Every structure is written in C-alpha cells, then in structure tokens.
Image: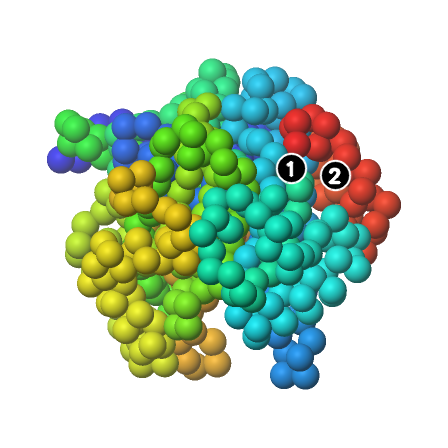
C-alpha cells in the first residue's frame, strides 16, 4: 500500500514515554511556534517503561543506589558517578517545578512525593563499605543530610518491617536521606502529553508505527541545524527526514517530512536507528533484560514501611537488579514492591516480539555482541538462573530484607523491559548500564539509549539534546532557558550556595 498523505512538521518524536514528554514540553516552552508530531505504536502514552508498574519509581539521586559508588583498590570510595546522577536529578526537579508553576502540570503530588531513600547491608565487609561510603558522601554538600547507623533499634525506627524478627547479633548498617522521592513517571508523562495534545501545532498519533525513516537531501528549513525554525503543521518547512507511518489497526500509511527527529522509543530505538542507516549507530547492539517484582497492597502492611531501601546486587548481576523494598504510590494508593528479579528475553519491549534480538544482529554489531557474551558469562549464567528461579527462592530473597514476610501478602508483577547498550570501544564490544544520547553527525536526529537512571534524568537528556542539536538557537533561547531551568549551566557539584538555593526553591514548588 503506498502512502496517500504527506505532512510536514518541525519535530517528530518517536515514542510517547517520559523522555519524549519532557523533551517535547521543554521545546514547546522554549519556542511555542514549533510544530510537532508524536508517534506511538500503542494506544496511549506511558504504556511501556514509563508506566508506574514497569519501573521502581525511584527519583534516582544516588542516595541509596550503592552501584553508583565504587571502592578503589586502596579502600577509598569513589563518589564521582553518584554526584553526576545526584545533580542530574536536580535538573529534572527544576524542569518539573517549571511545569507546575506554569500550569503544564496541576498538583505535583499526583506524580511526586517525598519518600526517604535508604541503603541497607548485612555482614562485616558490607558494613565497612557502607561506613566508608557515608563518611565520604556526608562531607559533600550534595549528600550532607545522609544519616548513618549500625544500631538495630535506630534502623528499626527507620524501617520497622525490615528489622522485625531479624536474627539477633546480625551485623547490619543503613544510611537514610529524608529528602528522597517516589515518582510516578506514568502520571508525569500523561500530564505532559495531555497538555501537549491541547497545544496548537502538536499532533499525537497513537496507534501508529514508524516503518521507514530515511534521510532527505537538499536544503532544510525548520528547527534543526541549518534550518530557519518556526514551521507549522502542514506549513512550508522542508524536512531533513522522511518518515513512513502505518496505522496498526487499519494498515493505512502516511508520510511526514521533519526537520528533526527525537527517538525516545525505549528498546525499539536501536531498530529505528538501523532503519535510518545512521552511521553513528554502527557497532551498537542491545542486551535485553526483563524482570519481575513482588508487590503487596495490604494497606496495614503498606502503612508500616515508608522508604525506598536498596541493598547490594548479587555478584554478576546487572545494576538494575539491585534488590530493593520500596514504598510506592500509584494512582494515589500506597503499595509495597520488592525486587527486581532479573531475567532474559529476546524481546526489546514488553509489547515486542521474540524476534527483536535476532533481528537486531547485523554484520557491524555481531562481533560486539559476541565479545560481550564471552566476557560476561557470569552475567548470562546469572540471568538464566533468574529465569529458572522457583517462587520459593524469590520469596527467600524477600525474607532477607523482610524476615517476617508472609507469602499470602505478595503477588508477582512483570516489570518493564530494559535494553542495555552494547557498543564498540577500541575494537571490542562493551556492555554499558547507563543512559546515553546518540546524535546524528549533522544534529538532525537524537536517540536515547540504555536504562538506569533513565527517567529520573529526563531533563538532563532533554537539555543535552537542546544544547547539542539546537546550538544555533541557544543565543535566542538563553533567557527563556534560564527561566525554565535556572541552574542548567551551573555545576551544582561545586557551587554549594546555588545547590542549596535551587533545592530549596524546587522543593517548595514540588512539595518535597
């Protein structure tokens, strides 16, 4: 079937998740004249990893996640990664506070609430690490509210369920930051897309799939590099990219010419980049990781635990498999979640196909994938073991955190699908566990790849794209950008006064 309709737009966003929502809302805040089309295969937004049931809801600020701090050979603790993640979350706080102040989002408590963040460890070696970690972090202004205790009575006050019926004499320690958050990224995404859907010049095409993404030759007008900016849907902007869309229900096709493309499609991003034949994406591959959670909805039980408590990951497990017992508020109702239990699947999305992984293998990434599989045999073995794990073993892991847990209070939930990055570095494939932005050489396309900290640093990702891909517009946008994200060009790791001021301001607006 040949396309029967051709539209023009300044920006196309592929995927209606939290990344696209934040980027689109930021761009419209910078320039309300930009036209946009959002393309989403599913019938609504936030139905994959952004859905509250598909992620931990932790506003990742490196308060509790031990994998962001590593111990050097000399015994000292490196907190550089933790500082990066911590201050990247400050950017999200600033952007979300702007959306609340300007009415893009109604009540902030619909998506963000204060929830203490804790780390909890057992055993002398782990306690020694946590003690050293706290000593370094608490001396820095970004983490100076972090409390530490090895006293079971104090830890029981912070997390009563976790200390109930715990064996006497067990060596334990915990840290706690009162200012942590629980974030319903699904609610945040829906609020932003609801507002975007009411904006003039914005089209949201649910139930449509991008089946072709090709670069156009010739002069360009529009918002991207080399363009003039300010097009309107159906106007005169000549696109740099031609996208073919297919209605998943009817099979009807249409084409769109766009000056800039943002790929915020989660695990589907790699396939789209392959479709675009983007040279910068050559050598990239994906390593899918699935997961399960146990969840409890007993209101009495939920009322007795108010924290997100992270432990240490098992040897050989990916960082996203760090065990944690979480307070969650979803749809205004409290829950407890424990997990995740990692697993392996060949799907790149929960709604994907088992052929996703095989289809992603190409001549330019097969070596990288082989390198990773060979060098991470322990990880592969761990994931297979998780897939084969019996329910009794899962529950045993919960009882390490919560010894008095009862099986009748907990049910299994399937978590969202994550695709870790495999990239070629110095001729060898390397498995990456973070989030990164891949841009076309001419700046006309940007794609978000990877997993944690993911949604928590959505504002940081959006700002990276603005500064790299729209550098020619920054002089005109600078004053407006400073209104939206006052600290976008301030290094809060080093500017203590600015850090404290911005946290106080955003905390007041967001109610955290």
Depicted 396 relative to depicted 352: above or below: below
Note whether residue 353 is visible. Answer: yes
Q: Is residue 74 or residue 225 the one in the foreground?
A: 74
Q: Earlier in the sequence, mark 1 or mark 2?
A: 1
**Quadrant that contains the N terminus:** top left
Question: Quadrant location of the C terminus?
Answer: top right
Tell which of 175 and 258 is nearer to you: 175
Q: Quadrant of residue 171?
A: bottom right
In the image, is 261 to the left or to the right of 60? left
How many residues crowd around disc 1 within 10 Å: few (fewer than 14), some, or many (20 or more)? many
- Residue nearest the viewer, comparing 347 with 247: 347
Q: Can residue 491 be seen in this snapshot?
A: no
Seen as rendered, the residue at the extreme front is: 168
Instruction: Please give the residue where the numbered disc 2 appears in the rendered image.
Output: 503
**In percent of the image, x 33 and y 47: which residue is there?**
293
Circle 2 Cα neighbour tier, 10 Å, few/some/many (<14 / 14–19 / ≥20): some
Residue at (57, 75) in percent of width and height: 125
Question: Distance from label 1 to label 2 (Cα)?
Answer: 8 Å
């Amino acid at each position: 079937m040949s396309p029967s309709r051709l539209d023009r737009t300044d920006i196309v966003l592929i995927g209606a998740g939290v990344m696209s929502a934040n980027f689109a809302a930021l761009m419209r805040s910078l320039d309300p004249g930009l036209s946009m089309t959002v393309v989403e295969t599913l019938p609504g937004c936030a139905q994959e990893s952004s859905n509250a049931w598909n992620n931990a809801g932790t506003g990742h600020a490196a308060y509790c996640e031990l994998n962001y701090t590593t111990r050097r050979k000399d015994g000292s603790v490196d907190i550089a990664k933790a500082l990066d993640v911590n201050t990247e979350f400050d950017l999200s706080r600033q952007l979300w506070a702007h959306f609340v102040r300007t009415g893009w989002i109604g009540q902030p408590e619909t998506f963000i609430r204060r929830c203490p963040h804790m780390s909890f460890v057992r055993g002398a070696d782990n306690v020694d690490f946590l003690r050293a970690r706290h000593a370094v972090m608490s001396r820095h202004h970004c983490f100076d509210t972090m409390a530490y205790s090895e006293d079971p009575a104090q830890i029981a006050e912070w997390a009563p369920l976790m200390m109930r019926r715990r064996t006497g004499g067990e060596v334990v320690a915990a840290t706690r930051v009162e200012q942590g958050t629980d974030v319903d990224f699904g609610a945040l995404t829906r609020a932003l897309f609801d507002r975007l859907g009411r904006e003039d010049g914005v089209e949201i095409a649910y139930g449509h799939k991008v089946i072709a993404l090709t670069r156009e030759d010739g002069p360009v007008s529009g918002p991207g590099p080399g363009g003039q900016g300010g097009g309107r849907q159906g106007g005169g902007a000549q696109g740099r990219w031609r996208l073919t869309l297919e209605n998943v229900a009817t099979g009807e096709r249409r084409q769109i010419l766009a000056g800039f493309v943002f790929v915020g499609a989660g695990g589907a991003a790699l396939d789209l980049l392959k479709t675009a034949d983007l040279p910068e994406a050559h050598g990239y591959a994906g390593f899918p990781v699935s997961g399960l959670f146990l969840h409890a909805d007993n209101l009495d039980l939920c009322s007795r635990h108010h924290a997100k408590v992270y432990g240490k990951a098992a040897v050989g497990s990916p960082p996203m498999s760090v065990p944690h017992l979480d307070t969650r508020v979803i749809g205004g109702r409290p829950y407890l979640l424990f997990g995740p239990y990692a697993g392996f699947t060949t799907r790149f999305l929960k709604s994907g196909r088992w052929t996703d992984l095989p289809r992603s293998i190409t001549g330019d990434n097969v070596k990288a994938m082989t390198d990773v599989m060979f060098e991470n045999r322990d990880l592969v073995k761990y994931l297979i073991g998780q897939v084969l794990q019996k329910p009794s073993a899962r529950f045993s892991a919960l009882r390490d955190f919560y010894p008095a847990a009862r099986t009748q209070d907990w049910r299994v939930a399937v978590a969202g699908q994550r695709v870790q990055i495999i990239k070629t570095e110095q001729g060898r494939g390397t498995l990456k566990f973070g989030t990164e932005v891949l841009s076309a050489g001419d700046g006309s396309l940007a794609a978000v790849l990877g997993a944690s900290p993911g949604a928590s640093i959505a504002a940081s990702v959006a700002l990276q794209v603005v500064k790299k891909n729209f550098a020619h517009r920054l002089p005109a946008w600078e004053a407006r950008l400073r209104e939206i994200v006052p600290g976008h060009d301030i290094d809060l790791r080093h500017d203590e006064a600015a850090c404290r001021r911005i946290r106080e301001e955003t905390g007041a607006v967001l109610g955290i």
